[in-house]
Image: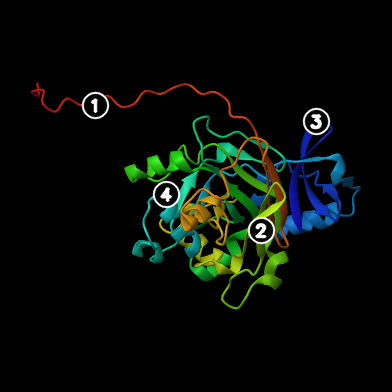
Amino acid sequence: MKFATFRHHGSTHTGVVDADAVHPIGSVDSMLELLRGGLDAALVLGKSALRSSAIPLSDVVLQAPLVPPTIRDFVTFEEHVAGVRRSIDGAEGVVDAWYEAPRFYFTNPYAVIGPGDSVLAPRDTRALDFELEVAAVVGRSGSSCTVEQARDHIFGYTILNDWSARDIQGREMQVNLGPSKGKDFANTLGPWIVTADELDRHRDEDGFLHLDCSVTVNGALVGHDSLANMAWTFDAMVAYASRDTWIHPGDVLGSGTVGNGGCLAELWGRSGERTPPPLLPGDVVTLTVDSIGSVTNTIGRSTTAPIVPPARRADHERPAR
């Protein structure tokens, strides 16, 4: 099933998408409430909703399916890692530590936007980029799960665009803390959550999902890859995320950016120049993933932001008091 969050006549609803229509689920107030009830209960509610009246998708505005409590964004595509490292750090290859475990960083759930929303980038970036990802959505609490147990904790999947200001990110990562404001301004989720059972037919014996992923900018194909090229399965990512801590319903785990042009920075690293060029206001970016759907966002004009001064430099020659 496809569970969506949408606005209709000024109100926000949760519903089941079927063909070109959505059937509201009147018994839940939000997607997060649906997730907390678990996948089995959600499927029962969804089947019941499908027997009710439908609203054409053309008459609603799709929202981000949920505002998650947490977003862990992993980096599981080796080709992407090598390309972006060359683009941002000027270094070749992939560091050994990447191969040891599925690494991730926490990004900003307050910056989540939905299909059709405008992306407002930081005013001082000159290297705005998209990132084509698929995200698993947790539907059951767990702690220190095994990889085998982790599969039952995944409610479903959605598309994630981890928008990035590469010039800001490059300066920030020199401090060895990972990205912050270079990634802090927008994360697209959508267009809905496809339940895990719907994608079982694409799952191979090792647990990888064979889904075609592509991205276009202003209608021109920029990148294309298979989700099966991940170095770790989503099950392994869930298990690692839960190690020595907890995961809870609504938590989102991004796959990391696919290879073969899943972002501009990878292509910049391989070519040695910014071709295709960074995104500009008015550019239209569409991510498409087989059996999940498509999300489109337009780059808007940046707004002004208060200036924060640089650090006060210490006078190391001044005697300590």
Tell me which numbered mark, 2 or 3, is placed earlier along the sequence.
Answer: 3
Neighbours of disc 1 within 10 Å: few (<14), some (14-19), many (20+): few
Answer left or right for 255 relative to 192: left
> From the viewer's perspective, is the residue at label 1 or at label 4 nearer?
4
Marks 1/4: CA–CA distance: 26 Å
Tell me which numbered mark, 3 or 1, is placed earlier along the sequence.
Answer: 3
- Residue 88 - label: 4
Q: Nearer the viewer, residue 293 or 17?
A: 293
For label 3, the SS is loop
Task: Read off the residue under disc 3.
Answer: 10
The type of residue carrying mark 2 is Ser
Question: Which residue does the image show at 41% across and 44% down from the upper left?
Answer: 170
| Res. 230 in view | yes
Task: Read off the residue under disc 2.
Answer: 214
Question: Which residue does the image show at 57% across and 57% down from the upper left?
Answer: 261
Tell me which numbered mark, 1 or 4, is placed earlier along the sequence.
Answer: 4
Answer left or right for 291 relative to 128: right
Neighbours of disc 2 within 10 Å: few (<14), some (14-19), many (20+): many
Task: Read off the residue under disc 1.
Answer: 313
Q: Residue 26 at what x, y percent from top left?
A: 81, 43
**Quarter in which the N terminus is drawn:** bottom right
Tell me which numbered mark, 3 or 4, is placed earlier along the sequence.
Answer: 3
For label 2, the SS is strand
> From the viewer's perspective, is the residue at label 2 or at label 3 nearer?
2
Q: Nearer the viewer, residue 39 or 69?
A: 69
The type of residue carrying mark 3 is Gly
For label 1, the SS is loop
